[in-house]
Image (cartoon, grey):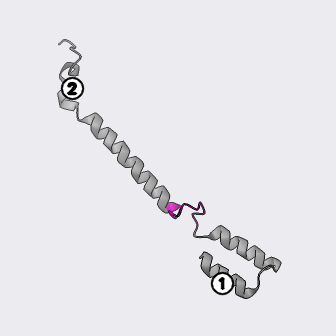
Amino acid sequence: MMWDGMNWGGWGMGLGWIFPLAVLGLIGWGVASLARASARSGGTGNGTGNGGGEALNILKARYAKGELTREEFETMRREVA
């Protein structure tokens, strides 16, 4: 059989749907991966990704140093969490 360059020796029409399907699959996989990454980081865009854990640690350190009163600490803790 001759290679005519149009249908890859008879395979073009039969398997021509595989490439577009693979491209759509890769796009879907990429979107799903970004959605999972966003869900893991909290989706807030603030980069903490741990529900304010870093901010809470800072508050605890300030309270331990005596920079905050108990009332200030509790108020800020509620706002962070």
Q: Is residue 2 above or below residue 28?
A: above
Residue at x-position 71% and y-position 75%: 59
Q: Marks 1 and 2, how far apart in space?
A: 68 Å
Q: Which mark is residue 39?
A: none
Tag shown at residue 75 = 1
- Residues shaded magenta: 40-50
Determine crowd level at label 2: few under 14, some 14-19, many 20+ residues with C-alpha closer than 10 A.
few
Residue located at (61% from left, 81% from top): 78
**Disc 1 residue type (three-letter):** Thr
Relative to the observer, which residue lies in front, 70 or 32? 70
> Is residue 43 placed above or below 73 in the rendered structure?
above
- Is residue 51 placed above or below 16 in the rendered structure? below
Judging from the image, what secondary structure is the residue with disc 1 in?
Answer: helix
Where's the C terminus, which quadrant?
bottom right
Quadrant housing the N terminus? top left
Of the numbered discs 1 and 2, the one sitting upstream in the chain is: 2
